[in-house]
Image: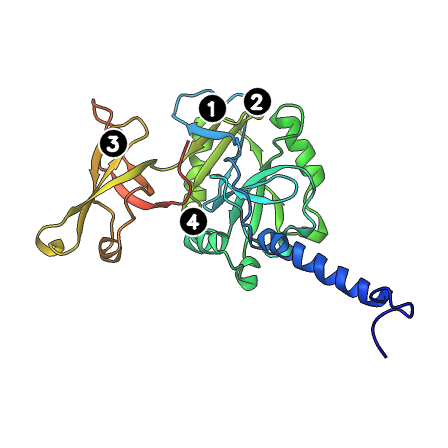
Amino acid sequence: MTPYSRAGQGPSSAVRRRFLTTLGTALLLPFAMRAQAAPLAPKTPPQLMLAEVYRPGMSLDDYWVSEKYDGVRGYWDGNRLWTRGGEPVIAPAWFTANLPRIPMDGELWAGRGRFDEAVSTVRSQSPNDAAWREIRFMVFDLPAQPGDFTARLTALRQLLPIPAASWAVPVPQQRATNHAALQALLDKAVKGGAEGLMLHRGGSPYRGERTGDLLKFKPYDDAEARVVAHLPGKGRHSERLGAMLVEMPNGQRFKLGGGLTDAQRDQPPPVGSWVTYRYNGSNASGLPRFARFLRIREDAPR
């Protein structure tokens, strides 16, 4: 039986349908392949509220206090998770499926003393399900919620926790009183393995900038700088890194060598990366005193 119509005028309807289907597939396939292969469009960094440093003598009126969680800053835009630097977080589907569809600002945290594990898990492009089971999304603010922080905190406590996403945790907050009580709270938290404390002014709106409405209180000063060069070592370190030449956000440069392990000297943070360092105050020129390397900073500071 021939595939043509009885009248001999051309192909049968079944053949025409197969032909059109094949033609349509051939025409659309390149577009489908490109759409499938296209990476997620880059996102500009979210405008997050950033902290200044608390100093003794500052007024504590109207401030709330919470633990400073040592993890990776996470921003949930209501649909996807992002880092502070605007990179997508590739989390398992179950981790985000039941999160509330409103923006939330928090920390992706693996627990006290587990910063490296949190970074490894959050930055991986192939999510490890078992590792993500150890991550908590410690939510401390609702950027799109109207009202001041105290009002947003009330809304947050009503929103979380939820049974379907118990790993999304509202950060416990308590009212600040005076410096002596705050120092005692810091000492207790640090002794237990915490990084420090955060203070958030109750009457503050959510502003995507660095502001004194949000303060960090730690047992040491820390800051970020960009690596601009690797300097060779001497003596025991003659065949490895001696120090890094780093540049502060204000353009000042200094050598940073203290605090580096032998493994970090063998494989130092790459030129162009940002690092966090500890220090004890600044000298008259504004350079940090007794600076020691702490860690690579995953997201460049603003």
- Indicate the amino acid at tag 4: Gly
The correct choice, above or below, for 216 with respect to 27 in the image is above
Separation of disc 4 and disc 2 at Cα?
29 Å
User: In this rendering, does residue 172 appear at all?
Assistant: no
Q: Quadrant of residue 120?
A: bottom left
Check disc 2 and report the residue beneath it. 204
The correct choice, above or below, for 233 with respect to 248 in the image is below
Q: Residues within 10 Å of mark 4 (few under 14, many from 20)?
A: few
Q: Tell me which label, 4 or 2, sits earlier in the chain.
A: 4
Picture coordinates of residue 108 (x, y %)?
53, 47
Separation of disc 1 and disc 2 at Cα?
10 Å
User: Which is nearer the eye, 204 or 28?
Assistant: 28
Check disc 4 and report the residue beneath it. 193
Mark 4: secondary structure: loop
User: In this rendering, does residue 39 appear at all?
Assistant: yes
Separation of disc 2 and disc 3 at Cα?
31 Å
Check disc 1 and report the residue beneath it. 211
Q: Residue furthest front?
A: 8
